[in-house]
Image: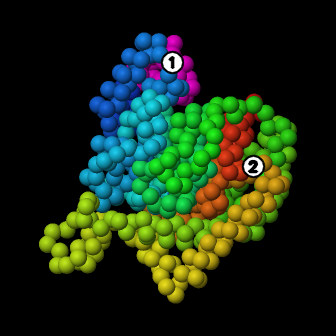
Amino acid sequence: MDYTKLSILELAKLLREGKVTSVELTKQVLAKIKEKEHLHALNSVMEEYALARASEVDQMFSEGKELPTLAGIPITIKDNINIKGFNTTCSSKFLENFVAPYSATIVENLEKNYAVIVGKNNMDEFAMGSSTENSAFYPCLNPRNEECVPGGSSGGSAAAVAADLGFASVGTDTGGSVRQPASLCGVVGLKPTYGLVSRYGIVAFASSLDQAGPLTKTVKDSAVMLNALAGHDAKEETSANVEKVDYMDSFTGSVKGVKIGLIKEFFGEGLDEEVKNAILDAANFYKSKGAEIVEISMPFVGSALACYYILSSAEAASNLSRFDGVKYGVSVDDPKNLNDLYLRNRSQGFGKEVKRRIMLGNYVLSSGYYDAYYKKAKKVQRLLVQQFADTFSKCDVILSPTSPTVAFKIGEKANDPLAMYLSDIYTVPVNIAELPAISIPCGLNKDNLPIGMQLIGKKFSEKTLFNVADVFETMKGEN
Ligand code: GLN
Protein backbone atom coordinates (compact mmCIF):
# COMPACT_ATOMS: atom_id res chain seq x y z
CA MET A 1 0.00 0.00 0.00
CA ASP A 2 1.09 3.55 -0.77
CA TYR A 3 1.03 5.51 2.47
CA THR A 4 2.55 8.70 1.11
CA LYS A 5 -0.79 10.40 0.44
CA LEU A 6 -2.05 10.06 4.01
CA SER A 7 -2.09 12.79 6.64
CA ILE A 8 0.06 12.86 9.76
CA LEU A 9 -2.96 12.12 11.95
CA GLU A 10 -3.94 9.10 9.86
CA LEU A 11 -0.41 7.75 9.99
CA ALA A 12 -0.04 8.41 13.71
CA LYS A 13 -2.96 6.03 14.23
CA LEU A 14 -1.57 3.35 11.90
CA LEU A 15 1.85 3.55 13.57
CA ARG A 16 0.31 3.02 17.01
CA GLU A 17 -1.82 0.13 15.77
CA GLY A 18 1.33 -1.49 14.42
CA LYS A 19 -0.10 -1.47 10.87
CA VAL A 20 2.91 0.33 9.46
CA THR A 21 6.42 1.13 10.70
CA SER A 22 8.33 4.37 10.51
CA VAL A 23 11.03 2.61 8.50
CA GLU A 24 8.42 1.57 5.91
CA LEU A 25 7.10 5.13 5.71
CA THR A 26 10.58 6.56 5.44
CA LYS A 27 11.52 4.12 2.67
CA GLN A 28 8.37 4.98 0.73
CA VAL A 29 9.07 8.68 1.05
CA LEU A 30 12.71 8.21 0.02
CA ALA A 31 11.58 6.23 -3.04
CA LYS A 32 9.12 9.00 -3.99
CA ILE A 33 11.85 11.60 -3.60
CA LYS A 34 13.95 9.62 -6.10
CA GLU A 35 11.06 9.21 -8.47
CA LYS A 36 10.27 12.95 -8.37
CA GLU A 37 13.85 14.17 -8.45
CA HIS A 38 13.15 16.25 -11.56
CA LEU A 39 10.91 18.57 -9.50
CA HIS A 40 14.01 19.80 -7.62
CA ALA A 41 12.00 20.15 -4.42
CA LEU A 42 15.02 19.04 -2.38
CA ASN A 43 18.62 20.18 -2.22
CA SER A 44 19.78 17.24 -0.14
CA VAL A 45 18.46 13.93 1.14
CA MET A 46 19.54 12.52 4.51
CA GLU A 47 18.85 8.87 3.83
CA GLU A 48 21.05 7.19 6.42
CA TYR A 49 20.18 9.62 9.19
CA ALA A 50 16.46 9.30 8.47
CA LEU A 51 16.44 5.51 8.39
CA ALA A 52 18.44 5.32 11.61
CA ARG A 53 16.02 7.65 13.37
CA ALA A 54 13.00 5.80 11.97
CA SER A 55 14.23 2.48 13.30
CA GLU A 56 14.87 4.04 16.73
CA VAL A 57 11.26 5.20 16.76
CA ASP A 58 10.01 1.77 15.67
CA GLN A 59 11.98 0.23 18.51
CA MET A 60 10.27 2.58 20.99
CA PHE A 61 6.85 1.82 19.54
CA SER A 62 7.51 -1.90 19.82
CA GLU A 63 8.39 -1.41 23.49
CA GLY A 64 4.94 0.14 23.93
CA LYS A 65 6.25 3.64 24.68
CA GLU A 66 3.82 6.54 24.46
CA LEU A 67 5.22 8.94 21.91
CA PRO A 68 4.22 12.39 20.58
CA THR A 69 1.93 12.49 17.52
CA LEU A 70 4.82 13.37 15.19
CA ALA A 71 6.89 10.35 16.19
CA GLY A 72 8.11 8.39 13.21
CA ILE A 73 6.67 10.78 10.61
CA PRO A 74 9.04 11.63 7.74
CA ILE A 75 9.19 15.37 6.98
CA THR A 76 11.45 17.81 5.16
CA ILE A 77 12.72 21.26 6.13
CA LYS A 78 13.76 24.35 4.22
CA ASP A 79 17.45 24.63 3.46
CA ASN A 80 17.97 27.76 5.57
CA ILE A 81 17.39 25.86 8.83
CA ASN A 82 20.42 24.31 10.50
CA ILE A 83 20.75 20.62 11.30
CA LYS A 84 24.07 19.93 12.95
CA GLY A 85 26.45 18.07 10.66
CA PHE A 86 24.43 18.65 7.48
CA ASN A 87 24.56 21.28 4.77
CA THR A 88 22.65 24.54 5.09
CA THR A 89 22.94 26.07 1.64
CA CYS A 90 20.10 28.64 1.49
CA SER A 91 20.18 27.63 -2.20
CA SER A 92 23.17 29.97 -2.55
CA LYS A 93 26.56 29.37 -4.11
CA PHE A 94 27.91 31.18 -1.10
CA LEU A 95 26.94 28.37 1.25
CA GLU A 96 27.10 25.45 -1.16
CA ASN A 97 29.50 23.53 1.05
CA PHE A 98 28.59 24.97 4.43
CA VAL A 99 28.03 22.38 7.14
CA ALA A 100 25.96 23.57 10.11
CA PRO A 101 27.92 23.47 13.37
CA TYR A 102 24.75 23.38 15.48
CA SER A 103 21.03 22.66 15.12
CA ALA A 104 18.25 25.23 15.08
CA THR A 105 16.02 25.17 18.16
CA ILE A 106 13.09 24.11 15.98
CA VAL A 107 15.11 21.14 14.70
CA GLU A 108 15.77 20.15 18.30
CA ASN A 109 12.05 20.54 18.97
CA LEU A 110 11.21 18.31 16.02
CA GLU A 111 13.76 15.76 17.20
CA LYS A 112 12.29 15.80 20.70
CA ASN A 113 9.00 14.93 19.03
CA TYR A 114 10.78 12.10 17.16
CA ALA A 115 9.93 13.45 13.71
CA VAL A 116 12.11 11.93 11.01
CA ILE A 117 13.76 14.64 8.91
CA VAL A 118 14.55 13.16 5.50
CA GLY A 119 15.86 16.12 3.55
CA LYS A 120 16.20 19.82 2.95
CA ASN A 121 14.10 21.81 0.54
CA ASN A 122 15.09 23.98 -2.35
CA MET A 123 14.23 27.68 -1.97
CA ASP A 124 14.85 31.12 -3.42
CA GLU A 125 18.41 32.13 -2.54
CA PHE A 126 18.45 33.43 1.05
CA ALA A 127 14.61 33.28 0.96
CA MET A 128 14.34 36.23 -1.41
CA GLY A 129 11.75 35.61 -4.07
CA SER A 130 8.27 34.34 -4.84
CA SER A 131 8.92 31.56 -7.35
CA THR A 132 12.00 29.52 -6.29
CA GLU A 133 13.56 30.57 -9.60
CA ASN A 134 16.17 32.48 -7.59
CA SER A 135 17.69 29.23 -6.33
CA ALA A 136 21.35 29.21 -7.39
CA PHE A 137 21.10 25.47 -8.12
CA TYR A 138 17.92 24.88 -10.13
CA PRO A 139 14.36 26.16 -10.22
CA CYS A 140 11.77 24.00 -8.50
CA LEU A 141 8.73 22.79 -10.47
CA ASN A 142 5.13 22.91 -9.28
CA PRO A 143 3.86 19.32 -8.96
CA ARG A 144 0.33 20.46 -9.93
CA ASN A 145 1.64 21.65 -13.29
CA GLU A 146 5.31 21.23 -14.00
CA GLU A 147 5.42 24.20 -16.37
CA CYS A 148 4.57 26.45 -13.46
CA VAL A 149 6.50 27.77 -10.47
CA PRO A 150 5.63 26.44 -7.02
CA GLY A 151 5.79 29.94 -5.52
CA GLY A 152 8.49 31.00 -3.12
CA SER A 153 10.60 31.36 -1.28
CA SER A 154 9.65 28.07 0.42
CA GLY A 155 8.74 26.62 -3.00
CA GLY A 156 10.64 23.39 -2.41
CA SER A 157 8.77 22.88 0.87
CA ALA A 158 5.35 23.39 -0.72
CA ALA A 159 6.23 21.25 -3.74
CA ALA A 160 7.50 18.47 -1.47
CA VAL A 161 4.27 18.36 0.53
CA ALA A 162 2.12 18.56 -2.62
CA ALA A 163 4.10 15.75 -4.29
CA ASP A 164 4.00 13.51 -1.17
CA LEU A 165 7.74 13.80 -0.51
CA GLY A 166 7.29 13.85 3.24
CA PHE A 167 4.14 14.51 5.23
CA ALA A 168 5.00 18.07 6.21
CA SER A 169 7.71 20.63 5.78
CA VAL A 170 8.92 23.65 7.69
CA GLY A 171 9.39 26.84 5.70
CA THR A 172 10.15 30.42 6.65
CA ASP A 173 7.90 33.39 6.04
CA THR A 174 9.29 36.93 6.00
CA GLY A 175 6.71 38.36 3.63
CA GLY A 176 4.63 35.39 2.55
CA SER A 177 7.14 32.65 1.83
CA VAL A 178 5.18 29.91 3.56
CA ARG A 179 1.68 31.02 2.57
CA GLN A 180 2.18 32.00 -1.08
CA PRO A 181 3.84 28.70 -2.15
CA ALA A 182 1.27 26.79 -0.08
CA SER A 183 -1.41 28.59 -2.06
CA LEU A 184 0.23 27.92 -5.43
CA CYS A 185 0.78 24.22 -4.69
CA GLY A 186 -2.58 23.55 -3.02
CA VAL A 187 -1.37 22.78 0.51
CA VAL A 188 -1.83 24.35 3.95
CA GLY A 189 0.75 26.93 5.12
CA LEU A 190 0.89 28.71 8.47
CA LYS A 191 2.81 31.85 9.37
CA PRO A 192 2.71 31.97 13.18
CA THR A 193 2.68 35.14 15.29
CA TYR A 194 6.13 36.75 15.35
CA GLY A 195 8.04 35.30 18.29
CA LEU A 196 5.98 32.14 18.71
CA VAL A 197 8.53 29.96 16.91
CA SER A 198 12.24 30.37 17.66
CA ARG A 199 14.48 31.81 14.97
CA TYR A 200 17.67 30.47 16.55
CA GLY A 201 19.65 28.52 13.97
CA ILE A 202 17.70 29.80 10.98
CA VAL A 203 19.67 31.93 8.53
CA ALA A 204 18.32 35.47 8.96
CA PHE A 205 16.80 37.41 6.09
CA ALA A 206 14.90 40.24 7.86
CA SER A 207 15.09 39.43 11.54
CA SER A 208 12.13 41.55 12.63
CA LEU A 209 9.83 39.83 10.14
CA ASP A 210 11.18 36.26 9.80
CA GLN A 211 9.08 33.47 11.21
CA ALA A 212 9.19 29.74 10.52
CA GLY A 213 5.98 27.83 9.95
CA PRO A 214 4.66 24.45 8.82
CA LEU A 215 3.40 23.35 5.40
CA THR A 216 1.06 20.39 5.60
CA LYS A 217 -1.67 18.51 3.77
CA THR A 218 -4.37 19.38 6.32
CA VAL A 219 -5.19 22.05 8.88
CA LYS A 220 -5.09 19.57 11.76
CA ASP A 221 -1.62 18.45 10.68
CA SER A 222 -0.58 22.10 10.83
CA ALA A 223 -1.70 22.14 14.47
CA VAL A 224 0.32 18.97 15.13
CA MET A 225 3.39 20.63 13.65
CA LEU A 226 2.89 23.89 15.53
CA ASN A 227 2.64 21.95 18.78
CA ALA A 228 6.17 20.72 18.10
CA LEU A 229 7.61 23.97 16.75
CA ALA A 230 6.22 26.61 19.14
CA GLY A 231 7.76 27.44 22.47
CA HIS A 232 9.85 29.97 24.30
CA ASP A 233 13.58 29.86 23.54
CA ALA A 234 15.97 31.51 25.97
CA LYS A 235 18.58 31.57 23.19
CA GLU A 236 16.52 33.97 21.12
CA GLU A 237 15.89 37.56 22.18
CA THR A 238 12.58 38.03 20.36
CA SER A 239 11.14 34.67 21.36
CA ALA A 240 7.74 35.23 22.98
CA ASN A 241 7.38 34.00 26.52
CA VAL A 242 3.80 32.82 26.24
CA GLU A 243 2.19 29.85 27.89
CA LYS A 244 2.37 26.66 25.88
CA VAL A 245 -1.03 25.62 24.56
CA ASP A 246 -2.23 22.48 22.82
CA TYR A 247 -3.23 23.50 19.31
CA MET A 248 -5.14 20.25 18.90
CA ASP A 249 -7.68 21.79 21.29
CA SER A 250 -8.57 24.35 18.62
CA PHE A 251 -11.27 22.44 16.84
CA THR A 252 -14.91 23.05 17.72
CA GLY A 253 -16.36 22.26 14.28
CA SER A 254 -18.33 25.48 14.33
CA VAL A 255 -17.96 29.10 13.20
CA LYS A 256 -21.27 30.24 14.61
CA GLY A 257 -21.04 33.88 15.66
CA VAL A 258 -17.47 34.27 14.39
CA LYS A 259 -17.03 37.66 12.73
CA ILE A 260 -15.14 37.35 9.46
CA GLY A 261 -13.81 40.58 7.95
CA LEU A 262 -13.41 41.26 4.24
CA ILE A 263 -10.98 44.11 3.55
CA LYS A 264 -12.37 46.23 0.72
CA GLU A 265 -8.89 47.21 -0.51
CA PHE A 266 -7.95 43.54 -0.97
CA PHE A 267 -10.44 43.05 -3.78
CA GLY A 268 -9.27 45.74 -6.19
CA GLU A 269 -7.05 45.89 -9.24
CA GLY A 270 -4.65 43.05 -9.99
CA LEU A 271 -6.76 40.35 -8.38
CA ASP A 272 -7.54 37.48 -10.74
CA GLU A 273 -11.30 37.09 -11.28
CA GLU A 274 -11.38 33.36 -10.51
CA VAL A 275 -9.37 33.86 -7.32
CA LYS A 276 -11.71 36.66 -6.27
CA ASN A 277 -14.79 34.50 -6.86
CA ALA A 278 -13.32 31.62 -4.88
CA ILE A 279 -12.74 33.90 -1.88
CA LEU A 280 -16.25 35.36 -2.10
CA ASP A 281 -17.60 31.78 -2.30
CA ALA A 282 -15.71 30.94 0.86
CA ALA A 283 -17.25 33.98 2.57
CA ASN A 284 -20.70 32.73 1.54
CA PHE A 285 -19.88 29.29 2.86
CA TYR A 286 -18.94 30.76 6.25
CA LYS A 287 -22.13 32.79 6.27
CA SER A 288 -24.14 29.64 5.64
CA LYS A 289 -22.45 28.11 8.68
CA GLY A 290 -23.48 30.94 10.97
CA ALA A 291 -20.51 33.30 10.72
CA GLU A 292 -21.07 37.02 10.31
CA ILE A 293 -19.39 38.70 7.34
CA VAL A 294 -18.20 42.26 8.00
CA GLU A 295 -16.92 44.62 5.32
CA ILE A 296 -14.02 46.74 6.50
CA SER A 297 -11.81 49.37 4.92
CA MET A 298 -8.08 49.59 5.64
CA PRO A 299 -6.88 52.59 3.62
CA PHE A 300 -3.19 52.10 4.52
CA VAL A 301 -2.94 48.49 3.54
CA GLY A 302 -1.89 49.43 0.00
CA SER A 303 1.33 50.92 1.40
CA ALA A 304 2.36 47.64 2.96
CA LEU A 305 4.21 46.33 -0.09
CA ALA A 306 6.48 49.37 -0.41
CA CYS A 307 6.97 49.41 3.34
CA TYR A 308 7.91 45.70 3.32
CA TYR A 309 10.46 45.98 0.53
CA ILE A 310 12.17 48.87 2.31
CA LEU A 311 12.26 47.28 5.76
CA SER A 312 13.11 43.77 4.61
CA SER A 313 15.86 44.92 2.25
CA ALA A 314 17.39 47.18 4.91
CA GLU A 315 17.56 44.28 7.35
CA ALA A 316 18.77 41.91 4.66
CA ALA A 317 21.62 44.24 3.68
CA SER A 318 22.71 44.30 7.30
CA ASN A 319 22.27 40.55 7.93
CA LEU A 320 24.06 39.58 4.74
CA SER A 321 27.06 41.76 5.43
CA ARG A 322 28.50 38.81 7.37
CA PHE A 323 28.94 36.88 4.14
CA ASP A 324 32.38 38.03 3.10
CA GLY A 325 33.94 34.70 2.24
CA VAL A 326 36.55 34.94 5.00
CA LYS A 327 35.38 32.24 7.39
CA TYR A 328 33.31 30.23 4.94
CA GLY A 329 31.65 30.41 1.56
CA VAL A 330 32.95 31.50 -1.81
CA SER A 331 36.51 32.74 -1.58
CA VAL A 332 38.57 33.88 -4.54
CA ASP A 333 42.28 33.14 -4.95
CA ASP A 334 44.96 35.83 -4.87
CA PRO A 335 42.98 38.90 -3.79
CA LYS A 336 44.89 42.17 -4.27
CA ASN A 337 43.75 43.59 -0.96
CA LEU A 338 40.89 43.32 1.56
CA ASN A 339 38.46 45.35 -0.53
CA ASP A 340 39.19 43.27 -3.59
CA LEU A 341 38.60 40.12 -1.53
CA TYR A 342 35.19 41.30 -0.30
CA LEU A 343 34.16 42.66 -3.65
CA ARG A 344 35.03 39.57 -5.64
CA ASN A 345 33.76 37.09 -3.06
CA ARG A 346 30.42 38.83 -2.77
CA SER A 347 30.10 39.42 -6.52
CA GLN A 348 30.65 35.74 -7.21
CA GLY A 349 28.80 34.33 -4.24
CA PHE A 350 25.46 36.13 -4.46
CA GLY A 351 22.87 35.86 -7.21
CA LYS A 352 21.11 38.73 -8.97
CA GLU A 353 18.09 39.10 -6.67
CA VAL A 354 20.17 39.00 -3.49
CA LYS A 355 22.44 41.70 -4.89
CA ARG A 356 19.37 43.77 -5.77
CA ARG A 357 18.12 43.55 -2.16
CA ILE A 358 21.53 44.44 -0.73
CA MET A 359 21.73 47.50 -2.95
CA LEU A 360 18.17 48.50 -2.14
CA GLY A 361 18.77 47.99 1.56
CA ASN A 362 22.00 49.96 1.68
CA TYR A 363 20.39 52.72 -0.35
CA VAL A 364 17.42 53.18 2.01
CA LEU A 365 19.77 53.14 5.00
CA SER A 366 22.33 55.54 3.62
CA SER A 367 22.58 59.01 5.09
CA GLY A 368 20.40 61.40 3.14
CA TYR A 369 17.89 58.71 2.28
CA TYR A 370 17.41 57.16 5.71
CA ASP A 371 14.68 59.62 6.74
CA ALA A 372 12.92 59.55 3.41
CA TYR A 373 12.75 55.78 3.14
CA TYR A 374 13.63 53.71 6.19
CA LYS A 375 12.21 56.06 8.80
CA LYS A 376 9.09 56.68 6.75
CA ALA A 377 8.57 52.92 6.30
CA LYS A 378 8.81 52.50 10.08
CA LYS A 379 6.07 55.13 10.44
CA VAL A 380 3.88 53.34 7.90
CA GLN A 381 4.47 50.15 9.87
CA ARG A 382 3.09 51.83 13.00
CA LEU A 383 0.02 53.03 11.09
CA LEU A 384 -0.58 49.53 9.75
CA VAL A 385 -0.33 48.02 13.21
CA GLN A 386 -2.89 50.56 14.40
CA GLN A 387 -5.17 49.87 11.49
CA PHE A 388 -5.09 46.13 12.12
CA ALA A 389 -5.94 46.80 15.77
CA ASP A 390 -8.97 48.86 14.66
CA THR A 391 -9.97 46.16 12.21
CA PHE A 392 -9.79 43.45 14.89
CA SER A 393 -12.13 45.47 17.06
CA LYS A 394 -14.73 44.84 14.33
CA CYS A 395 -13.99 41.22 13.41
CA ASP A 396 -12.28 38.06 14.74
CA VAL A 397 -10.47 37.02 11.56
CA ILE A 398 -9.83 38.53 8.15
CA LEU A 399 -10.51 36.48 5.02
CA SER A 400 -8.50 37.37 1.90
CA PRO A 401 -6.82 35.84 -1.11
CA THR A 402 -3.33 34.53 -0.30
CA SER A 403 -1.94 35.49 -3.69
CA PRO A 404 -3.54 37.62 -6.42
CA THR A 405 -3.04 34.84 -8.98
CA VAL A 406 -2.65 31.08 -9.26
CA ALA A 407 0.75 29.56 -10.10
CA PHE A 408 2.37 31.33 -13.03
CA LYS A 409 4.60 29.91 -15.76
CA ILE A 410 8.31 29.43 -15.13
CA GLY A 411 10.10 32.44 -16.59
CA GLU A 412 6.96 34.57 -16.81
CA LYS A 413 7.99 37.07 -14.14
CA ALA A 414 11.66 36.20 -13.80
CA ASN A 415 12.84 39.42 -15.43
CA ASP A 416 10.22 41.69 -13.93
CA PRO A 417 11.00 42.13 -10.22
CA LEU A 418 8.06 44.47 -9.68
CA ALA A 419 5.55 41.95 -11.05
CA MET A 420 7.18 39.32 -8.83
CA TYR A 421 6.97 41.56 -5.74
CA LEU A 422 3.26 42.10 -6.40
CA SER A 423 2.69 38.38 -5.65
CA ASP A 424 3.18 39.31 -1.99
CA ILE A 425 0.58 42.06 -1.82
CA TYR A 426 -1.78 40.20 0.53
CA THR A 427 0.83 38.43 2.61
CA VAL A 428 3.31 41.16 3.60
CA PRO A 429 0.90 43.24 5.77
CA VAL A 430 0.72 40.24 8.11
CA ASN A 431 4.49 40.15 8.70
CA ILE A 432 4.70 43.90 9.11
CA ALA A 433 2.12 43.72 11.91
CA GLU A 434 3.62 40.52 13.44
CA LEU A 435 0.29 38.67 13.02
CA PRO A 436 -0.48 35.00 12.40
CA ALA A 437 -2.10 33.85 9.15
CA ILE A 438 -2.91 30.57 7.47
CA SER A 439 -3.35 29.76 3.79
CA ILE A 440 -5.58 26.86 2.83
CA PRO A 441 -6.71 25.55 -0.55
CA CYS A 442 -10.17 26.81 -1.54
CA GLY A 443 -10.73 25.49 -5.03
CA LEU A 444 -9.26 25.13 -8.50
CA ASN A 445 -9.32 27.49 -11.45
CA LYS A 446 -10.37 26.47 -14.96
CA ASP A 447 -6.91 25.06 -15.65
CA ASN A 448 -7.03 22.92 -12.51
CA LEU A 449 -4.54 25.08 -10.63
CA PRO A 450 -5.10 25.48 -6.90
CA ILE A 451 -6.44 28.71 -5.40
CA GLY A 452 -5.52 29.61 -1.84
CA MET A 453 -7.35 31.68 0.73
CA GLN A 454 -5.78 33.41 3.69
CA LEU A 455 -7.18 33.81 7.20
CA ILE A 456 -5.46 36.46 9.31
CA GLY A 457 -5.89 36.71 13.09
CA LYS A 458 -4.87 38.79 16.08
CA LYS A 459 -1.52 38.05 17.71
CA PHE A 460 -1.44 34.57 19.24
CA SER A 461 -4.87 33.65 17.88
CA GLU A 462 -3.58 30.56 16.04
CA LYS A 463 -6.28 28.44 17.64
CA THR A 464 -9.04 30.57 16.13
CA LEU A 465 -7.35 30.42 12.73
CA PHE A 466 -7.03 26.64 12.92
CA ASN A 467 -10.68 26.25 13.85
CA VAL A 468 -12.03 28.57 11.15
CA ALA A 469 -9.74 26.99 8.53
CA ASP A 470 -10.65 23.46 9.60
CA VAL A 471 -14.39 24.14 9.32
CA PHE A 472 -13.86 25.13 5.68
CA GLU A 473 -11.55 22.20 4.93
CA THR A 474 -13.74 19.54 6.50
CA MET A 475 -17.23 20.90 5.74
CA LYS A 476 -16.95 22.70 2.40
CA GLY A 477 -17.57 19.47 0.50
CA GLU A 478 -20.92 19.07 2.23
CA ASN A 479 -22.27 22.26 0.67
N1 GLN B 1 8.54 37.09 -1.69
C1 GLN B 1 8.95 37.90 -0.60
C2 GLN B 1 10.36 38.41 -0.85
O1 GLN B 1 10.88 38.09 -1.85
C3 GLN B 1 8.85 37.15 0.67
C4 GLN B 1 10.02 36.32 1.00
C5 GLN B 1 9.90 35.57 2.28
O2 GLN B 1 8.86 35.57 2.93
N2 GLN B 1 11.00 34.95 2.67
O3 GLN B 1 10.92 39.11 -0.07
Q: Is residue 141 above or below residue 247?
A: below
> Visible in this render: residue 357?
yes
Are the two marked residues, 1 and 2, in contact with CB atoms closer than 8 angstroms?
A: no
Q: Is residue 138 above or below residue 472?
A: below
Instruction: Give the residue drawn at x 26%, y 65%.
Output: 325
Instruction: Give the residue drawn at x 69%, y 45%.
Output: 461
Which corner quadrant of the image does residue 392 belong to? bottom right
Q: Which residue is mark 2?
A: 397
Instruction: Give the residue drawn at x 25%, y 65%.
Output: 326
Instruction: Give the residue drawn at x 80%, y 63%.
Output: 297
Decide which of 109, 116 is in the foreground and name it: 109
Pointer 1: residues within 10 angstroms few (<14), some, or many (20+)?
Answer: few
User: Quadrant of the image for the C terminus?
Assistant: top right
Pointer 2: residues within 10 angstroms few (<14), some, or many (20+)?
Answer: many
x then y, percent, for residue 7: 55, 28
Q: Is residue 256 above or below residue 95?
A: above
Sequence order check, earlier mark of 1 and 2: 1
Left or right: 367 as drawn, with respect to 23: right
x then y, percent, for residue 353: 42, 67
Q: Is residue 20 above or below residue 101?
A: above
Left or right: 291 as drawn, with respect to 324: right
**9 inside magenta stretch:** yes
Q: Which residue is mark 1?
A: 66
Mark 2 secondary-structure assignment = strand
Mark 1 secondary-structure assignment = loop
Decide which of 44, 207 is in the foreground and name it: 207
> Visible in this render: residue 419?
no
Magenta-tinted stretch: 1-25
**358 inside magenta stretch:** no
- The amino acid beneath tag 2 is Val
